[in-house]
Amino acid sequence: MEIIENNGRLLFAVPKKGRLYENCLALLEKIGIDFKRKARHDIALVSNLPIALLFLPAADIAKYVAEGDVDMGITGQDIISETECQDLIEELLPLGFGKCKLQVQVPSKSGITSAEELVGKRIVTSFPALTQKYFDELESKTRAETPQEQQGTPQQQKRNTKVKYVNGSVEIACSLGLADGIVDLVESGETMRAAGLQVAGTVLQSQAVLFCRKNKRYPELVEKLKSRIEGVLTARKYVLCQYNILRNNTEQAIKITPGRKAPSIMPLDKPDWVAINAMVEKAVLAETMDQLTQLGATDILVLAIDNCRV
Ligand SMILES: Nc1ncnc2c1ncn2[C@@H]1O[C@H](COP(=O)(O)OP(=O)(O)OP(=O)(O)O)[C@@H](O)[C@H]1O
Ligand SMILES: O=P(O)(O)OC[C@H]1O[C@H](OP(=O)(O)OP(=O)(O)O)[C@H](O)[C@@H]1O
């Protein structure tokens, strides 16, 4: 086996496949990380920074970082919670992709509408720790709400929801008769509906995050990567809006396009007019342009931001 010399390099783990993979590769390219990954190699040395990239299963990345084997990584918040390692890691940035919910699902024909009805029953999941915790809490809650005289003996009170782990294809567990409900990730809901399931409760919401171990080995490099990624995320969220407006309307125009810090205002070669440049959130761009037009702005241009540093 070839041993790769990683000494003095920050170890940065990203998912080797699956839902987060493409987005992670796009992000690495945008932040200017140069590497060549040889076919079937799960480690790649970065040529322009002292970093080694590790391509690992998304589900293992939180554990590697928490245990100090790897310096930083990208994975889902769901995996960090499932690994129960929040005390050992530092979440640096939510990344805006890999958004999904971990939800309790039951057969649509079961007549069950809430997770409480599954307490004491059989649940199949790839998230056993979170599922067990969720049902333990439900069990304590339902017990606390039951009048003392109806609670029965301590033995009767313990209903012990049975949580079973499977690695994938969780959604078929109910139709195979292995489970009364499942706990699985839902984004569009297509997988759930195709399996004849419906939502009965939400365990958590998740998205991909950049995170590092608490005792950082290379704090400056971690900060550099965080700042580069932050710039890329900001560039994706904003556009640059440029327009001309009568000088007398500047104050109102600034209210419409305040920018991130402040807009830049430049004189035009027409004394009554100024040009204004401001970053505008894509989500409110159409509304902002309507308001500028109403105020009498002209030559409103919208420019994409390829990258930036905030
Ligand atoms: N449908 C989805 N939409 C958005 N994000 C998701 C979705 N499914 C999973 N994720 C996120 O991606 C992470 C990795 O899930 P994924 O299913 O890609 O795992 P994998 O087992 O490594 O890949 P594969 O399914 O190819 O075996 C999840 O923990 C979650 O944070
Ligand atoms: O709500 P949806 O948009 O349908 O997405 C949800 C599905 O996506 C994930 O699985 P994935 O397709 O990644 O494959 P897996 O089951 O092999 O993990 C997850 O485990 C769900 O099954």
Image: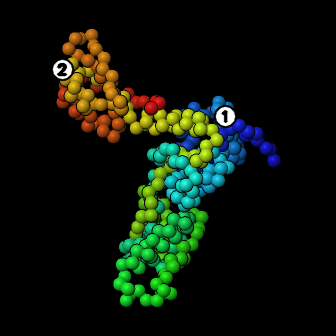
Q: Is residue 170 visible?
A: no
**Dot 2: element:** helix
- Residue 262 place in picture, x, y as percent: 33, 28
Disc 1 Cβ-to-ligand 1 distance below 8 Å: no
In this view, 213 is above or below 173: above
- Number of residues whose C-alpha sits closer than 10 Å to that of mark 1, classed few (under 14), some (14–19) or many (20 or more): some
Say how the picture is coloured: rainbow
Q: Earlier in the sequence, mark 1 or mark 2?
A: 1
- Number of residues whose C-alpha sits closer than 10 Å to that of mark 2, classed few (under 14), some (14–19) or many (20 or more): few
**In-front residue for pair 206/243:** 206
- Residue 294 place in picture, x, y as percent: 18, 30
* Location of residue 298 by image quarter: top left
In this view, 263 is above or below 145: above
Residue extending farthest to the right is 1
**Dot 1: element:** loop
Image point (22%, 26%), residue name: 251
Image point (26%, 37%), residue name: 287
Q: Is residue 148 visible?
A: yes
For label 2, the residue is 248
| Residue 39 falls left or right of residue 125 | right
User: Label 1 amino acid?
Assistant: Pro
Image point (57%, 72%), residue name: 164
User: Label 2 amino acid?
Assistant: Asn
In this view, 124 is above or below 101: below
| Residue 239 falls left or right of residue 123 | left
**In-front residue for pair 135/202:** 135
**In-front residue for pair 167/145:** 145
User: Which quadrant would the C terminus be assigned to in this image?
Assistant: top left
- Residue 87 place in picture, x, y as percent: 55, 55
- Total numbered badges shown on the rendered structure: 2
For label 1, the residue is 50
